[in-house]
Amino acid sequence: MEYFFTILQVIIAMINLTVTNEICSLQGEYVYPTLSKEGDIIIGGIFPFHNSWEISELVYLVKPQPPECRSLDFRGFQYSQSLIFATEEINNSSSLLPGVSLGYKIYDTCRSTAMTVRTVMALVNGNEKTVLDEPCTKPAQVQTIIGDTYSSPSMAIASSIGPFRIPMISHYATCNCLSDKRKYPSFLRTIPSDYYQSRALAEMVKHFGWTWVGAIRRDDDYGNSGMATFTEAAEQLGICLEYSLTFFKTYSQEKVLRIIQQIKSSTSRVIVGFLDDMDLGILLRVFFEHNITGYQWVGTEAWIFDPVLAALDEHSILQGAIGLAIPKTTVTGLQDFILDINPLKSAGRDIFPKFWEALFGCKYTLPNDSDDTKVCTGEEKLSEIENTFTDMSPMPIFSNVYKAVYAVAHTLHDLLGCTQTCPTKKQPDPFTFLEHLKRVHFKTKDGEEVYFDENGDPPAKYDIINWQKGEENQHEFVTVGLYDSSFPAQNRLAVNMASIVWAQNNNQVPVSVCSESCPPGTRKAVQKGKPICCFDCIPCAEGEISNMTDSIQCEQCYQDYWSNHHRDECVKKEIEFLSYEETMGILLTAVSIFGAFITITIAIIFFRYKNTPIVKANNSELSFLLLFSLALCFLCSLTFIGQPSEWSCMLRHTAFGITFVLCISCVLGKTIVVLMAFRATLPGSNVMKWFGPPQQRLSVLTFTLIQALICVLWLTTSPPFPFKNLNYYKEKIILECQLGSAVGFWAVLSYIGVLALLCFILAFLARKLPDKFNEAKFITFSMLIFCAVWITFIPAYVSSPGKFTVAVEIFAILASSFGLLFCIFLPKCYVIILKPEQNTKKQMMGKVPVK
């Protein structure tokens, strides 16, 4: 950019060389300043002394007259008084710019961008009507321009004078767009940018829980730029705009009715107004006509602190409005100076009579048709009236004008090298002055710090203002909080909620949401085709939770945890295993102990009657060993009950496998003895010597050792171990014994099955032995029961869930054990106890004798 302007200066210099003989003359009409005072260095000012203008009819036959300004605006006079006060104070100072006098030329803009640019050109180039014998290129007539009040004219001014690097300091133009130094390199301001205001408004709306709002903005650079920044900040904070409407005072009735219809059809109860006081004043009448009341208004500094607007709000449409205002400040002596009309009288003789007439509602010259208009005497007292000029509520804005003048003075003081006095009164060139102005840093006499950031903006601080009704039913502006952009993000906004009066005139914060908040245990699901603020609340899935309001997703619980009924907390999963405390565990334990007790009882009976023929005839040694193994079988089922551990997992399967093999080996031995005994009765048979007691013991030992070897290999290679089964039940943890090696487990079962099947076959072959032989049929029935139980066990074991798997296994052990016990030993006990007459050698000899 600097390179561009260097080239521009070279081109201008070359043009000057070619037109040295040309003279400079004023083109167009002379534009007089509204207020002025001569000085060594002139400060320009542009303020709206009128609210509107009127253009004469264009006939294209004669040169049109300049626009005529209408309706005096007292605010412009207050701003001018602030500039004059600062100038006079500096001129009277012995420490700031000693020996240098500041003058001013203040122009009226009439709130017209075209007239604003025209006055700026007058400030920059001068207004001489005489023909000057000098080059047209000369320094600017003013050192700095202070103004304008509004953003759109300020943009036009900044664009016009920016290439010449003439500084412009605005006291009230807040558009964020003016912070772009590429477009507006010489623009500075003493009021914060709307960038901060828009973000502060968004944070405030979020603070009150309003996520569904409407917006109306002024259809110009101020409104459009501010609303764009607000919308961006709102989206980042999760706030949605149901509508964003534009308005301008020149809108047709049809456009205004469309705005009314949009507001009426909306569901949001909060309206953000990026408007100025005049816009809202026009809308108030329309809102009342269409009964648009009860809305919570959120406002900008352009209207939230305006007493004129408050006076227009006769029907309390803006009651409870809340918004941002420039913080209250004081400038010692400024209020008294503004209310002193003499400076205006001496500085602007032409406009002063109009000002006096408007101020006191009188006329110096009465029209012929007027009877009730009073005559101005010139002795009217300002203390006897109350109007906009006497209202000092915009003192922060007056202070901004004051600070702008002082920023210029401090910069000049440094550039001119002033100490006791200033060695020169020559006006610095604009470029040098602008660069120093950007870096100025000072404190006012009241201790307020003044400086500009890299964008030419001051630090952003706002008071939060709430419209409330006073005792006389008048609006009062109550400060209920503050916003400071220099604080950390979480501390920028501070609001006293208890002191706020809301639009509905109650103590409850208004609700303005598209969808009600989703409670913990649910998540938000955006409704198709609608903004993110419109959503449905979807319950979290099983195993997932959300423990905060308006959660956007549900979180998965950790492995050992599960969601509770409300889906808002992860709780420890229920641990399931077959315990001794539960009913099923107690019953199985009782049955196991009962079985062991019956077995021991039978063993005692057999031991008591061991010398009786029936005990001797049934191979008492194998019988006692079988009873011992059956007792172990009953007791080994207890190892399946209780919380699985490393030792219990290894013990339960190996103990079960070995004890059952021992049991089946004994039965198998008895079966073989039965067959051998039958063969031994045949003439010339010598079979029993091959399967006598030593061979019987060896066979039982061999069969059992084979199973023991299988178990040792299983435990050595991949033993069973405790395992948390998280897959079968999502909400439960099943503690079970993982088999480790499935091959080892099924090898143990298969070996038991092979022995049982062999025993069953041999017993089945003995079915045609004599009917009264004491063991044959009993072994057959017991093996039939055993095989039936274990064949049924396999599918039941595989399909049973959780602890029922263990219960099925215990049931199979107990059922098969009881089957062997009752089928083999119950008939003998029946004879021993109830039929002792049959337990004689004679009775036994009547049957096939057994050696």
Image (spheres, rainbow, N blue to C red):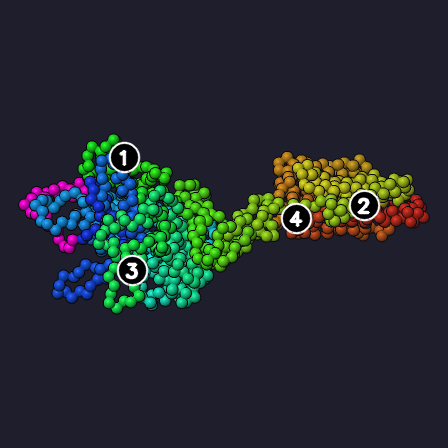
Q: Which residue is mark 4?
A: 802
353 horizontally vs 207: left or right: left
Look at the numbered disc 3 and give the secondary structure of its residue: strand
Q: Position of residue 822 (x, y in %)?
A: 81, 48
Residue 68 visible? The answer is: yes
N-term-proximal mark, 1 vs 4: 1
Quadrant location of the C terminus? top right
Look at the numbered disc 4 and give the secondary structure of its residue: loop
Q: Is 9 placed above or below 566 here?
A: above
Q: Which residue is mark 1?
A: 94
Magenta segment boundaries in residue numbering: 1-30
The amino acid marked with disc number 1 is: Ser
Tell me which residue sits at (72%, 36%) in the image.
705
N-term-proximal mark, 4 vs 3: 3
Tell me which residue sits at (34%, 38%) in the image.
445
Q: Position of residue 144 (x, y in %)?
A: 24, 44
Q: Position of residue 570 (x, y in %)?
A: 58, 47
Look at the numbered disc 2 and give the secondary structure of its residue: helix
Q: Which residue is mark 3?
A: 362
Quadrant location of the N terminus? top left
The residues bearing labels 4 and 3 have C-alpha atoms spaced at a distance of 100 Å
Residue 753 visible? The answer is: no
The residues bearing labels 2 and 4 have C-alpha atoms spaced at a distance of 26 Å
**Dot 2, crowdedness within 10 Å: few (<14), some or many (≥20)?**
some
Q: Which residue is mark 2?
A: 594
Foreground label between 1 and 2:
1
The amino acid marked with disc number 2 is: Phe
N-term-proximal mark, 3 vs 1: 1
The amino acid marked with disc number 3 is: Cys
